[in-house]
Image: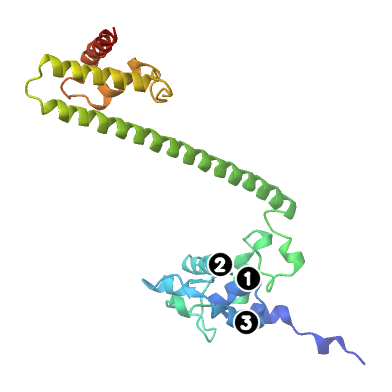
């Protein structure tokens, strides 16, 4: 005769009153079958060696939830939400080293009741318990999660916009730097001339006028420089970035540019 009590494995009681090392509890929480936990933990490595906590938190190459769930349990112990015990299950008021921390399944279960139903460990909660919560129903949780996911998408879009603006800023700075080098080179050439005779001055005026034509796109097969809508904009940029350089003030450039273009046109005639 089949007697039901002979087949009762007392799985719930065993799980609640078993003592789990923190990494084992986290692996079970991640859904790793009990007979595969030790094997999977052999693939996990500490996130660092600088302190006891970093040595106690493990990172698995494929089981991405292991590290955050170890962190969650360790944080709950530090905050007093879960009482840690030693390997033998003995609890005391003394400090238990991070790497030696164990937890009772029942303590872990009570703490996990504060978490969203979908985050309740299956080895401690049955399906009905995972769908129940003292503060929020499963339907409410799904509604909140949908709102959260929408916010995540909005945040991702904002980050993409920031990246685009950053790229545009870098491009503008590159153009500014190129213009600065061009003007500095012209300035160095000008400083090297102690006395400029009329022929040399005419040559410089021709060069300035030719550069202005290139920037304005007045030459065949030459496109207008996209950064300067007008000659006035070019003068403003030079005056802004090279303020203090002799000969590069807005008033002087406003006089010299037309003079250079006039001198070049006179040469053509």
Residue marked by disc 1 = 29
Percent of width and height locating residue 234: 32, 20
The residue closer to the viewer here, 52 or 135, is 52
Cα separation between marks 3 and 2: 19 Å
Cα separation between marks 1 and 3: 14 Å
Crowd band around label 1 with a 10 angstrom C-alpha radius: few (<14), some (14–19), many (20+): many
Q: Is residue 75 left or right of residue 180?
A: right
Residue contact between numbered discs 2 and 1, judged by CB atoms under 8 Å: yes
Is residue 195 depicted above or below 76 in this figure? above
Give whichever of discs 1 and 3 has the lower sequence position: 3
The residue closer to the viewer here, 211 or 24, is 211
Residue drawn at x 53%, y 68% is: 67
Crowd band around label 2 with a 10 angstrom C-alpha radius: few (<14), some (14–19), many (20+): many
Residue marked by disc 3 = 18
Residue marked by disc 2 = 69
Give whichever of discs 2 and 1 has the lower sequence position: 1
Q: Quadrant of residue 132?
A: bottom right
Q: Quadrant of the C terminus?
A: top left
Q: Which mark is residue 21?
A: none
Q: Secondary structure at mark 2?
A: helix
Crowd band around label 3 with a 10 angstrom C-alpha radius: few (<14), some (14–19), many (20+): some
Give whichever of discs 3 and 2 has the lower sequence position: 3
Percent of width and height locating residue 150: 63, 44
Is residue 149 depicted above or below 39 in this figure? above
């Amino acid at each position: 005769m089949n007697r039901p009590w002979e087949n009762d494995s007392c799985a719930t009681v065993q799980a609640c009153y078993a003592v789990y090392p923190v990494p084992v509890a986290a692996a079970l929480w991640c859904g790793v079958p009990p007979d595969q936990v030790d094997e999977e933990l052999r693939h996990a490595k500490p996130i660092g060696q600088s302190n006891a906590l970093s040595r106690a938190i493990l990172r698995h190459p494929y089981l991405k939830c292991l590290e955050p769930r170890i962190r969650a349990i360790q944080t709950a112990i530090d905050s007093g939400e879960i009482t840690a015990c030693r390997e033998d299950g003995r609890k005391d008021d003394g400090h238990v080293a991070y790497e030696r921390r164990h937890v009772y399944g029942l303590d872990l279960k009570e703490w996990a009741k504060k978490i969203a139903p979908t985050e309740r460990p299956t080895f401690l909660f049955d399906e009905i318990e995972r769908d129940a919560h003292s503060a929020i129903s499963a339907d409410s949780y799904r509604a909140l999660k949908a709102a959260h996911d929408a916010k995540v998408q909005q945040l991702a879009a904002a980050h993409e916009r920031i990246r685009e603006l950053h790229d545009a800023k870098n491009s503008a700075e590159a153009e500014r730097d190129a213009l600065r080098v061009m003007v500095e080179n012209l300035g160095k050439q000008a400083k090297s001339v102690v006395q400029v005779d009329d022929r040399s001055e005419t040559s410089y005026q021709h060069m300035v006028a030719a550069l202005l034509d290139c920037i304005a796109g007045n030459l065949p097969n030459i496109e207008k420089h996209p950064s300067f809508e007008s000659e006035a904009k070019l003068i403003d940029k030079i005056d802004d970035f090279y303020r203090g350089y002799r000969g590069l003030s807005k008033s002087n450039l406003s006089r010299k540019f037309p003079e250079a273009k006039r001198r070049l046109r006179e040469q053509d005639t």
